Each structure stands twice: as C-alpha cells, then as structure tokens.
Image (cartoon, helix red, strand yellow):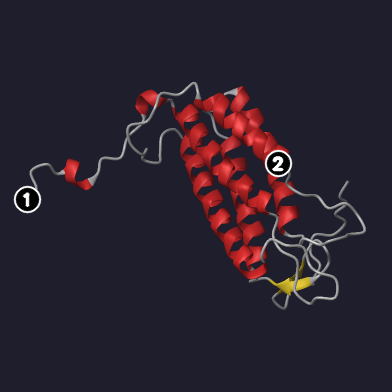
Amino acid sequence: MVNLTRIYTRTGDHGETRLVDMSVTAKTDPRVAAYGDVDEANATIGVALTLPGLDDQVRQVLAQVQNELFDLGADLGNPLAESQEFEPLRITAEYVERLEQWCDGFGEQLPKLRSFILPGGNPAGAQLHVARTIVRRAERTAWHAVEVYGTEPAQSGSDRPGGINPLAIQYLNRLSDLLFILTRVANGTESEVLWVPGGDRNPDRS
C-alpha cells in the first residue's frame, strides 16, 4: 500500500526529481518523459471511462489497463539493477500476453479493414483515439530512453544508470494496438469513416 501524506514536497523546484530507486535525475530525462507520457495516456483513458458509448466488457478492460499503467510508470521510473533490496515492480511477459489476448478477443469480432480509419466517432471512441496516439508517443519516448540508457542492469561499481525494461516498451506497443481495436468496438464499424488517399479523392486531377 502507498501512503501519500503530503502532495507537495518542494523537492522538484530546481528541475530535478527522484526516481523509484531514489536516485536524482533531471525532469527532462527521457526516462521521466516516458513515464510522464504514460501518465498522460492514463488520464486520457480516464476521460474515456466517463463518457457514454462503452460496453461493460470494454470498461472492465480499460479499468484494468489504468492500474497496469501505474505499474508501467513504476517500472520505467526504476532503472534496472542486478540486485535490489526489495523486489521491484516490473512489467512481465504476462502483462503483454494479456493485452494480446484482449486484442484477439475483441478483434475477431470486427470486420477486416480496407483502409485506415479517420479518428472520430462517438465521444468515447474519439477519446480512445487520443489515448492511442499518446501511447504511441510514450513508446517513442521510451525508445529514446533506451538509446540513452540501454536495456541492461547497472553494473556494480559503474556510474552508468541502469537501463529500461524491454517488456515495458512491448506493453506500450500492444496497448496502442488494443486501443485502436477498442475504438472500433466503441464506435461501431458500420459508421467508420475510412481514409481516402489523395489521388482517389481527386480522380480528375491530372
């Protein structure tokens, strides 16, 4: 259980913050940016859950995803280490497999697509499109953190911080796929507006 006794701490007033392992880093650190994007995605899913247009099964899945995104943020904010005093909270293959099962379960009920879908639809579906794009951004930001820190644990005696858990980034990739599928479920495929490429939009253009 996490106990939050005071929300403001004044410790971040000079552009620095503490990671989960209590190490200090800049607020512009790509690792911090990655879990910040995850937080933004979580908030956007929260907005979607306040809107009509979602059936109970979709709501249950999104509620579980919200909790898992907190796990993900804790993982991204905790550099990999060879040994830690307490077992760290990490995204595991089970998390990724669960997303894939949801993708398969919801996706098999949907007709195949002939083109890309224009974002929109009903309020809940449109909001899930926004969440999908933020998750994509979080994935890109996490890969930037990998470029800086790698994916290996910190070596004892080294000043180099530990890397990023690759399964955390896999989770983001699968989640963006799931959110795309859930936009189709929320909006109903009969009213989908498909992208028409430029040449097809203007057949008489020379």
Residue 69 lies left or right of residue 174; in this view the side is right
Can see residue 189?
yes
Which of the two labelled residues, at mark 1 and mark 2, occupies the earlier sequence position?
A: 2
Provide residue 116's location: percent of width, then percent of height.
Answer: 36, 39
Residue at 83% in and 53% down: 88
Residue at 14% in and 44% down: 202
Can see residue 12?
no
Task: Please state which of the two labelled residues, at mark 1 or mark 2, is closer to the viewer.
Answer: 2
Provide residue 180's location: percent of width, then percent of height.
Answer: 49, 38
Vertical relation: 135 (above or below) 128: below
Residue 135 lies left or right of residue 85; in this view the side is left
Provide residue 71's location: percent of width, then percent of height.
Answer: 74, 47
> Which residue matches tag 2?
93
Say which amino acid is labelled 2: Ala
> Which residue matches tag 1?
206
Is residue 199 or residue 6 the one in the foreground?
199
Say which amino acid is labelled 1: Ser
Q: Secondary structure at mark 2?
A: helix
Mark 1 residue crowding within 10 angstroms, few (<14) / some (14–19) / many (20+):
few
Vertical relation: 121 (above or below) 206: above
Provide residue 43's location: percent of width, then percent of height.
Answer: 62, 47
Residue at 58% in and 64% down: 144
Q: CA distance from mark 1 to mark 2?
A: 52 Å
Is residue 50 or residue 130 the one in the foreground?
130
Residue at 54% in and 29% down: 52
